[in-house]
Image (tube, helix red, strand yellow):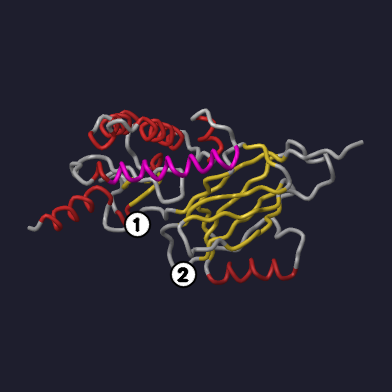
Amino acid sequence: MTDEARDITRKEALFGKSAKEKILLGQAGFSKNAIDLQVERICNSAAFDDKESSRTLLHYLVDEALAGRVPHPTDIAAHFGKEAFDPSESYVRTTAKRLRQHLTKYYDTAKPTEIGLEIPHREYFVLTPRKTGELANPGDSPPLASILEPLEKADVYCQVMVRGRTDVLNPDLRPWLVVYAPDDCYYPQCRVSRRTPSWSYEVRIGRGDWGETEGIEFTILLVAADIDGDGEFHSYKKARLDGFGARMPTDVQVLDTRRVIRRDIRPEA
């Protein structure tokens, strides 16, 4: 076997042959202790010698991932003691780029039995292969489709930016963002693009008057619909209906949810 073939085999053992075998770190089935040991192994390696900022960022992103959070660049900048302005976000992007390079260098010689950690380009969350043997039938693995922001129980205004990923999903299914409101109605927002693994859309939370819905819980859902459900969602949007009703189309699969609290901005007196 050539050196190139060995290198490909090693990387396939670490990261799998396709994106289907990767999952968000906190959902992969590894214990926190095993992940912590892997991070320390990486940070103490030659690939990370004199790379203090990369070590700091890796620790931070892994801790955030295990807590179910995806930090914004300004959050990362604050962690490094930088001001939360555009220059600091440029610093974060540069530091993250270097971290990815150092991780690539480390895994070039890593053992196939090690936990693989990967930070996608222009993203600040951690992917890893699913733990071997976690599922009896790999075909039963849920799709890698999730909402990354807003966080559970986050305070939001009338408009909220929702970010997430849709890496692996049956091509016959159409992902949508839907808001479930306290009036027991579903409000389809938009179909999620699958052109790239990550996506972001702005959705509207609530339709009540100023102050009347402050503190009320809403649910943002990422769902997968078949062709009939997709058609019903589009019909709703086209008709500009005020509420989809208490039931979504049949055979709609809920992929992920986030519960948020609406916090209205009161007008000046």
Nearest the camera: 173 or 269? 269
- Magenta stretch, residue numbers: 85-104
Q: Residue at x 63, y 49 (%)?
A: 161
Q: Residue 264: give x, y in percent of width and height.
A: 77, 40
Q: Secondary structure at mark 1?
A: helix
Q: Residue furthest right?
A: 269
* Sequence-wise first label, 1 or 2: 1
Q: Amino acid at mark 1?
A: Lys
Q: On the rendered image, what quadrant is the C terminus found in?
A: top right
Question: Which disc, if any, is residue 20?
Answer: 1
Q: Secondary structure at mark 2?
A: loop
Q: CA distance from mark 1 to mark 2?
A: 16 Å
Query: How many numbered discs?
Result: 2
Q: Amino acid at mark 2?
A: Asp
Q: Residue 143: give x, y in percent of width and height.
A: 42, 55
Question: Which one is in front in this view, the residue at disc 1 or the one at disc 2?
Answer: 1
Q: Residue 120 magenta-drawn?
A: no
Give the vertical position of 95 relative to 122 (above or below).
above
Give the vertical position of 151 relative to 140 (above or below).
above
Question: Which disc, if any, is residue 172?
Answer: 2
Q: Residue 58: give x, y in percent of width and height.
A: 38, 35
Label 1: few (<14), some or many (≥20) within 10 Å?
Answer: some
Quarter location, residue 242? bottom right
Q: Residue 86 magenta-drawn?
A: yes
